[in-house]
Image (cartoon, rainbow, N blue to C red):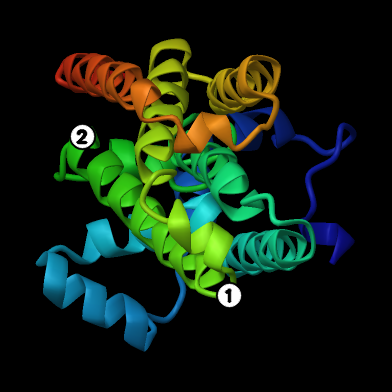
């Protein structure tokens, strides 16, 4: 084995090293990393979306991986149990934060293992991002509604928290897209929601005001609309050539 390894004391080693195509070697390594068998879920998504590449990018979303989904379900279950025990609609209070964190991590170089792959796809960045956001929002909504069914208190505001959840998710995504940092986006979304909950506690005497006060719905929708417009504008820019 050692006879085939280059060394500083062997003639011709410098020329051998200069002839190595490192870019080609890296492409081979990346191909091995990304190569995996296509599962039934990916094949189904590929047929529904009419794009195998988009299906793979969707399943590679950090907040759609199995550990993240299990953690989200566990948090919702804990919220449902706390709601039954205390009467406070913790499911509605937790749902915007969970969705904001998940959607914030749907975008961003450094946290998304498929970010470089999506940049080389024929599908636009906007389409990849839209598919991911809709999938995360739908899953979190289903988990939240399922957890709300266990408590009459939570069921009473079951649809009330969907509006602030949209606003928090939109803000987290917009900040992540603008700053190109998922961590900053998640911090902005969860920070806004923490302020809203604490403000409801200070104004009405209970944190549930952040989801039950109908006067807040219009500001929530305005924030969501502005953030959606910002995301559409930023993702409409052409890709930079490497």
State the residue at coordinates (62%, 60%): 72
Residue nearest the observer in this picture, 176 or 121 = 176
Question: In front of the other: label 1 or label 2?
Answer: 1
Q: How many labels does the image show?
A: 2
Residue nearest the observer in this picture, 231 or 155 = 155
Helix, strand or loop at label 2? It is helix
Q: Name the residue under label 1.
A: 150
Direction from residue 197 to residue 131 in the image, left or right: left
Question: Hey, which quadrant is residue 54 in on the image?
Answer: bottom left
The residue lying furthest to the left in this view is 50
Residue nearest the observer in this picture, 143 or 40 = 143
Direction from residue 194 to residue 47 in the image, left or right: left
Give coordinates of residue 216: x percent, y percent. 39, 22
Give coordinates of residue 209: x percent, y percent. 55, 31
Q: How far is the residue under mark 1 from the one under mark 2? A: 37 Å
**Quarter that holds the C terminus:** top left
Q: Give the crowd class for mark 2: few <14, some 14-19, many >=20 residues within 10 Å.
A: some
Q: Name the residue under label 2.
A: 126
> Is 104 rendered above or below residue 40?
above
């Amino acid at each position: 084995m050692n006879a085939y390894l280059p060394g500083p004391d062997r003639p011709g080693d410098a020329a051998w090293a200069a002839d190595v195509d490192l870019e080609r070697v890296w492409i081979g390594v990346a191909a091995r990393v990304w190569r995996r068998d296509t599962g039934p879920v990916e094949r189904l998504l590929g047929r529904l979306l009419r794009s195998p590449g988009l299906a793979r990018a969707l399943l590679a979303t950090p907040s759609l991986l199995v550990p993240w989904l299990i953690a989200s379900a566990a948090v919702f279950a804990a919220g449902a149990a706390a709601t039954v025990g205390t009467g406070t609609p913790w499911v509605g209070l937790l749902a915007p934060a969970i969705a904001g964190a998940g959607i914030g991590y749907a975008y961003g170089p450094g946290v998304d293992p498929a970010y470089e792959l999506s940049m080389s796809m024929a599908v636009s960045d906007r389409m990849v991002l839209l598919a991911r956001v809709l999938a995360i929002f739908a899953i979190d909504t289903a988990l939240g509604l399922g957890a709300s069914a266990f408590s009459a208190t939570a069921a009473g505001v079951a649809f009330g928290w969907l509006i602030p959840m949209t606003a928090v998710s939109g803000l987290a995504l917009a900040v992540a897209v603008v700053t190109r940092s998922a961590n900053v986006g998640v911090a902005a979304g969860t920070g806004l929601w923490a302020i809203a909950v604490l403000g409801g506690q200070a104004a009405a005497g209970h944190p549930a005001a952040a989801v039950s006060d109908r006067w807040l719905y219009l500001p929530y929708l305005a924030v969501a609309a502005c953030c959606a417009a910002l995301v559409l504008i930023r993702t409409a820019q052409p890709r930079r050539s490497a």
